[in-house]
Image (cartoon, rainbow, N blue to C red):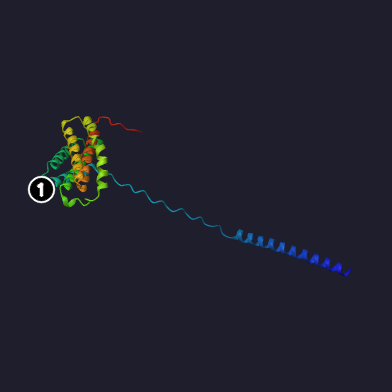
């Protein structure tokens, strides 16, 4: 009898402990919820301000024209033996003509810019020819891959020269088609002679001449196509 009473007593005590534990957990949850409700709302951080887009002003026509004229003046005033090269002088003469075309088309911004680009490309070609004639400027004589890469692209570029010349429709353009081909052939000869720096420069010169013809064709076309 006494033993059974002790069992019942222990059982009731265990239930009371379980209820006390549950009540303690519930009380803790309610306490934490109360603290959260009383806490001030978190401030949302502002997203970082985006950097303002910097718009570079377009060069003014008179500034671009003046810069092109100064460059031509500097190249024309060179007195080194290489500067007497026939191809070099021919390229500068054509650049001078193209600057004159740009001056006469100031009322048409597109044509004006095309003529100036063509003049700049002719002077780029002249620069490359001048450097190719100076052995001290060929610093990559051992880089055959760079020269081959330039000449491979130049081969296809030169084949476009005749197309642009047909659009321009003057005899002078035909002369520069032949000049582009000649510069490419000179580059190939330099490559075969393992003068890789010279070959690369002459290939770039030929490509610049073709680019000048392309710009001239765009300036000559009355209604250039615009693809949308």
Residue at the right extreme? 1
Q: Secondary structure at mark 1?
A: helix
Q: Quadrant of the N terminus?
A: bottom right
Name the residue rendered at 60%, 59% in the picture.
36
Is residue 83 something that shows in the picture?
yes
Is residue 65 something that shows in the picture?
no
Name the residue rendered at 88%, 70% in the picture.
2
Q: With respect to residue 75, does 28 lie above or below?
A: below
Q: With respect to residue 213, does 138 lie above or below?
A: below
Q: Is residue 223 left or right of residue 83?
A: right
Name the residue rendered at 69%, 62% in the picture.
25
Q: Looking at this view, is 223 or 189 the one in front?
A: 189
Q: Residues within 10 Å of mark 1 (few under 14, many from 20)?
A: few
Q: Is residue 9 left or right of residue 144?
A: right
Across and down, in percent, residue 161 comes to 22, 34
Q: Looking at this view, is 156 or 216 the one in front?
A: 156
Q: Looking at this view, is 77 or 64 the one in front?
A: 77
Q: Is residue 36 left or right of residue 15?
A: left
Across and down, in percent, residue 221 comes to 25, 31
Tag 1 residue: 81
| Tally of numbered discs | 1
Residue at the bottom extreme? 2
Quadrant of the image occupied by residue 204? top left
Quadrant of the image occupied by residue 216? top left
Across and down, in percent, residue 47 comes to 46, 53
Q: Quadrant of the C terminus?
A: top left
Across and down, in percent, residue 122 comes to 19, 41
Q: Looking at this view, is 154 or 208 the one in front?
A: 154
């Amino acid at each position: 009898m006494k033993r059974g009473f002790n069992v019942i007593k222990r059982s009731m005590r265990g239930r009371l402990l379980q209820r006390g534990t549950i009540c303690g957990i519930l009380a803790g949850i309610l306490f934490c919820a109360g603290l959260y409700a009383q806490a001030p709302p978190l401030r949302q951080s502002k997203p970082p301000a985006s950097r303002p887009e910097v718009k570079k002003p377009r060069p003014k026509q008179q500034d671009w024209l003046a810069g092109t004229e100064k460059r031509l003046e500097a190249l024309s005033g060179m007195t080194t033996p290489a500067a007497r090269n026939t191809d070099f002088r021919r390229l500068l003469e054509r650049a001078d003509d193209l600057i004159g075309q740009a001056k006469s088309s100031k009322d048409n911004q597109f044509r004006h810019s095309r003529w100036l680009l063509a003049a700049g490309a002719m002077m780029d070609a002249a620069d490359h020819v001048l450097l190719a004639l100076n052995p001290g400027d060929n610093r990559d004589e051992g880089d055959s891959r760079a020269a081959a890469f330039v000449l491979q692209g130049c081969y296809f570029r030169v084949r476009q020269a005749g197309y642009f010349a047909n659009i321009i429709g003057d005899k002078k353009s035909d002369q520069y088609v032949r000049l582009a081909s000649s510069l490419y052939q000179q580059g190939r000869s330099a490559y075969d002679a393992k003068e890789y720096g010279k070959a690369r420069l002459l290939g770039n010169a030929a490509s610049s001449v073709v680019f000048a013809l392309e710009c001239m064709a765009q300036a000559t076309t009355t209604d250039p196509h615009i693809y949308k």
